[in-house]
Amino acid sequence: MMKRLIASIVSICFVLVACLSFPEIAQAKSCTLRIIGWEGYMDASFAKPFEQKYGCKVIPTYAGSSDEMYAKIKASKGKTYDLVTASGDLTKRLYDANLVEAIDLSLVPNYKDLFPIFQQPAYNTFDGQAYGVSIAWGPDFLIYDKSVVKSEPKSWNVLYQPEYQGKVSLPDYPIFNADVALWKGSSNIYDISKDQLATEIKPDLFRLRPQVRKFWNSQGELAQLFLNKEIALAWGWPVAIEELKRANFPVGATIPQEGTTGWSDSWMLLKGSPNKEIAHAWMNYMLTGEAQKPMTEVTGYWAVSQQVLPLLTAEQRRDSHLEDIENYYSQIHFWETVPNYDDWVALWNEFRGQ
């Protein structure tokens, strides 16, 4: 009995010495930063250096759509997450629902190094205050299997072609209605009334249903559909393209002549977070070149901070349109908050259920 007691005391002493010798490890056990968001934004390649520096564990929860993020955040009532990676179709919804709070920019000194178009943009600035810090941006691509689709498609109409019936994948996401509106030449693709949805969007949307093999919920799932040769074409994001490239898959990606939609994402601080200081530290860290570069390499998304420029080759800057950023950015129809989103969801559910 005495030997067991001595052994226990010795073990406790070793633990105490370890904690005193490595305070960052001890701190990491009690400090967590909980983030809900898109795939790739909390990757270990750049999250680990942050954890080591601040002694705080980054715990990601990945979601497949803004709708999923909104539902989980609303249900958690500020108890589950500290930050969210919000796209332009979600930012104002969170603000209007009083689920986020203003950013203290004095705690994000690297904010000044954002490209000017990302400093207090309309999609994350409300009542003159910054409610978000930009992360990355990019277009929605037409992705295709080069071994099946022999030449680069020039139009989104390729998705309708009979030879690709059952060979297309789309996002399980009502925001896709805006893409159909764009292809039809609508002037304001995020402001479509219930009547317009029924008369202008529904016919062309429903013609796509026989083409769809599966609706994807994550970019990993989309990449796997290509790798399994289940699909030949898809609407998707650069992170899937990068995953397919790493697998040596013959992937092609293009923006057809009708143009495309896109997303400009922001870190947003959720109301009720007990970890505001470390959340601001994370947002500041993610604007450094050392974080932006691996983030873009993992995701294929495009950087927002000028700190990354010295770390990129001329080819990388050109491919990411960082040298003509304002011109290229202006050509993408970035997601916005949809005023009658319930109508969009109703149409999408009808489309999905066919």
Image (cartoon, grey):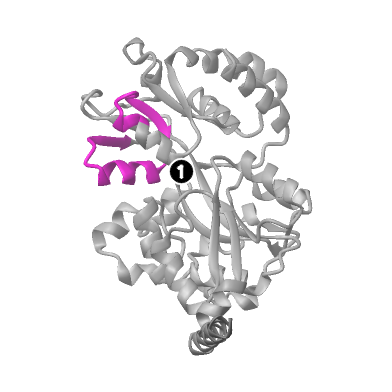
Residue drawn at (66%, 41%) of the image? 337
Q: Is residue 157 left or right of residue 114?
A: left
User: Percent x, y for residue 101?
Assistant: 73, 62
Instruction: Report which residue position mark 1 lands on.
Output: 331
Mark 1 lies on a secondary structure that is loop
Quadrant where the N terminus sits is bottom right
Q: Amino acid at mark 1?
A: Gln
* Nearer to me, 85 or 59: 59
Residue at position x 53%, y 64% from top? Answer: 58
Badge 1 crowding class, 10 Å Cα cut-off, few under 14, some 14 to 19, many 20 or more, is few
Left or right of 188 on screen, residue 129: right
Tell me where residue 332 appears, x and y as whole percent: 47, 42
Residue 44 magenta-drawn? no
Determine which quarter of the picture holds residue 158.
top left
**Identity of the residue drawn at 30% across and 26% down:** 153
Residue 256 visible in the displayed image = no
Q: Which range of residues does the magenta coloring cover?
A: 225-253
